[in-house]
Each structure stands twice: as C-alpha cells, then as structure tokens.
C-alpha cells in the first residue's frame, strides 16, 4: 500500500502489532502442539521475550525484518522521512543487541526467529522452522541443566545466541 499522505503512513504503521502477531501465534500453537510449555512476554526479563521456557533457561524472540532491521530482502527503508526511519531502526537494533547481551550474561539461551524464515523468497517450510526450534529447545534442556557456553550461529532466518 502506498499512502498518499504522510499522515496515512503514520496511521498504517501505528496499527502494526508489537505482540501476538500472526507469525508469533502460529509458532506458539505449533510448539504447544509438540508439548512445549512457555510463558509469554515476561516483563522481568530484558526485552520481554516473546516466548520464555524457564525450565530450559531459553527465550525466543520473533522479529519482523522491517522493525528490527534484518539484513534480508524483506527490509527496505521507506523513502519518505528516511532519516526518522533510519534512526528508529538503528535504535531498535541497538536495543535488541543490548537485550540479547544482558540475557546471555544472565545465562539464558536466546533464539531469534526472523520473519523471513517463513515469508519471502528465501523462506523455509514452516515445519522446518518448528523442527529447528524444537531441536534447539531440547538441546537447551539437556546441556548443563539448561545452559550452554556462549555461542552465536545462524540457521537460515533464525539466529541463535546461547547463554553462559
């Protein structure tokens, strides 16, 4: 949708949800069906992770590629008011890095699922993303009682950061 006025773009952007997005609900439903139990948006943790698995000391963030500035084909800065959007996305990325650092320093295993993992030209099958998540969660439950040495790796559109 190409808004004709700046106000229209602002109205459109303000209606985009921050939580309980379609992707988040789909992932939650699939994980629940596989027997995983979790807490939602725990305010006690940095960044209020979308899914928290306390017994596994694991958190999952489900990020939209635009809002979190993912370096993929789904991310494109708007041409109007580009300075504002550039600063906003940079601040979001910085905040995300800070949250992940604080969580890993506290011993949490962190996984970021990017929107492009299940949408767009490089998408994986939804089942593959769920299987990747389930395998990762099972590993978090096994290694050192739920924690593992600090590491970062990428799995398609999914980024993993393990706690210390």
Image (cartoon, rainbow, N blue to C red):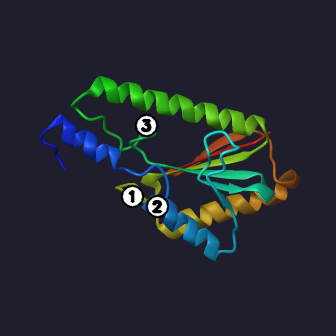
Neighbourhood count class around disc 1 (C-alpha, 10 Å): few under 14, some 14–19, many 20 upward: some
- Rounded to the nearest angstrom, the CA distance separating label 1 from label 3 is 16 Å
What's the CA distance linking mark 3 and mark 2? 17 Å
In the rendering, which numbered label is found on residue 37?
Answer: none
Q: Which of the two labelled residues, at mark 1 and mark 3, occupies the earlier sequence position?
A: 3
Residues 87 and 110: in front is: 87
Q: Residue at x 31, y 23 (%)?
A: 83
Q: Which residue is mark 2?
A: 23
Q: Could you tell me residue 156's position as x and y percent?
A: 51, 52
Residues at discs 1 and 2 in contact (Cβ within 8 Å): yes
Left or right: 67 with respect to 161? Answer: left
Q: Nearer the viewer, mark 1 or mark 2?
A: 2
Q: Position of residue 132 (x, y in %)?
A: 61, 61
Q: Nearer the viewer, residue 44 or 95?
A: 44
Q: Residue at x 36, y 27 (%)?
A: 86
Q: Quadrant of the C terminus?
A: top right
Whichever of labels 1 and 2 marks the residue nearer the N terminus, that label is 2
* Label located before the other in sequence (3 or 2): 2
Residue under numbered circle 3: 69
In x, y percent, where is residue 118? 44, 60
Q: Residue at x 44, y 48 (%)?
A: 64
Residue for badge 1:
119
């Amino acid at each position: 949708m190409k808004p004709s006025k700046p106000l229209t773009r602002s109205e459109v952007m303000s209606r985009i949800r921050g939580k309980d997005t379609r992707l988040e609900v789909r992932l939650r439903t699939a994980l629940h069906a596989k027997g995983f139990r979790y807490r939602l948006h725990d305010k006690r943790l940095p960044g209020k992770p979308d899914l928290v698995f306390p017994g596994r000391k694991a958190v999952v963030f489900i990020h939209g590629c635009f809002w979190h500035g993912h370096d993929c084909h789904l991310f494109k800065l708007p041409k109007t008011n580009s300075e504002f959007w550039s600063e906003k996305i940079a601040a979001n990325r910085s905040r995300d890095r800070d949250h992940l650092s604080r969580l890993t320093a506290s011993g949490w295993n962190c996984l970021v699922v990017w929107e492009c993992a299940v949408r767009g030209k490089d998408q994986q099958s939804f089942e593959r993303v769920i299987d990747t998540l389930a395998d990762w969660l099972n590993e978090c439950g096994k290694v050192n009682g739920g924690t593992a040495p600090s590491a970062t790796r990428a799995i398609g559109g999914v980024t993993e950061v393990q706690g210390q």
